[in-house]
Image (cartoon, rainbow, N blue to C red):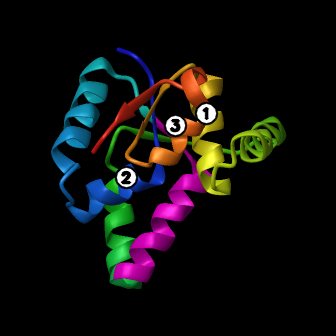
Amino acid sequence: MKSYVLDANVLYGYLAGESKKKRVGELFKKASRADRPVFMSVVNWGEVAYLIWRAKGESTARRLLADADKLPLQLEPVLREDALAAAQLKVVHNLPYADSFAAALALREHAILVTADPHFERVGKRLQILWLN
């Protein structure tokens, strides 16, 4: 199985029960069967926490994030080198700052970025993307 990195919108949509839930659920099942986690930067996880909290309130955010702890999702810390790579992606490709961390993690892990955000097209063929539309 290939490695995957989730963008914040993908995990948010999955936890909120949006239309992408089935495809993301299949990705998590595949990861569990292969005993390989799906990666996410802690910066993007924080963005998910913020989005849920803002949209649905603190108690729902805490409950949904606790549900996420049961997923085969590996949160990756941000190292100094990761922050520099994200800064470069932000400057060169004009990505939103938090999204730069998802792209940097995908590039570091030679993984496929799972997203529905079209602004990742700015990075070009350097970034492998699984589009969820």
Is 53 included in the stretch rendered in magenta?
Answer: yes
Residue 113 appearing in the image: yes
Residue 76 appearing in the image: no
User: Which stretch is magenta?
Assistant: 39-55
Residue at (82% x, 35% y) in the render: 81
Q: Mark 2 = which residue?
A: 11
Q: Considering depth in this image, is 63 or 119 the residue closer to the camera?
A: 119
The amino acid on which the numbered mark 1 sits, given as a three-letter code, is: Val
The image quadrant that residue 102 belongs to is top right
Q: Residues within 10 Å of mark 1 (few under 14, many from 20)?
A: some
Dot 1: element: helix
Residue at (79% x, 40% y) in the render: 88
Is 106 included in the stretch rendered in magenta?
Answer: no
Dot 2: element: helix
Q: Mark 3 = which residue?
A: 121
Q: Mark 1 = which residue?
A: 123
Answer above or below: position of 64 versus 104: below
The amino acid on which the numbered mark 3 sits, given as a three-letter code, is: Glu
Mark 2 or 1, nearer chain start: 2
Q: Residues within 10 Å of mark 2 (few under 14, many from 20)?
A: many
- Apparent side of residue 35 relative to residue 7 in the rendered image (left or right): left
Q: Nearer the viewer, mark 2 or mark 1?
A: 1
The image quadrant that residue 82 belongs to is top right
Asked if the residue at tag 1 contacts the one at tag 3, i.e. Cβ–Cβ closer than 8 Å, the answer is yes
- Tell me the quadrant of the picture where the C terminus can be found: top left
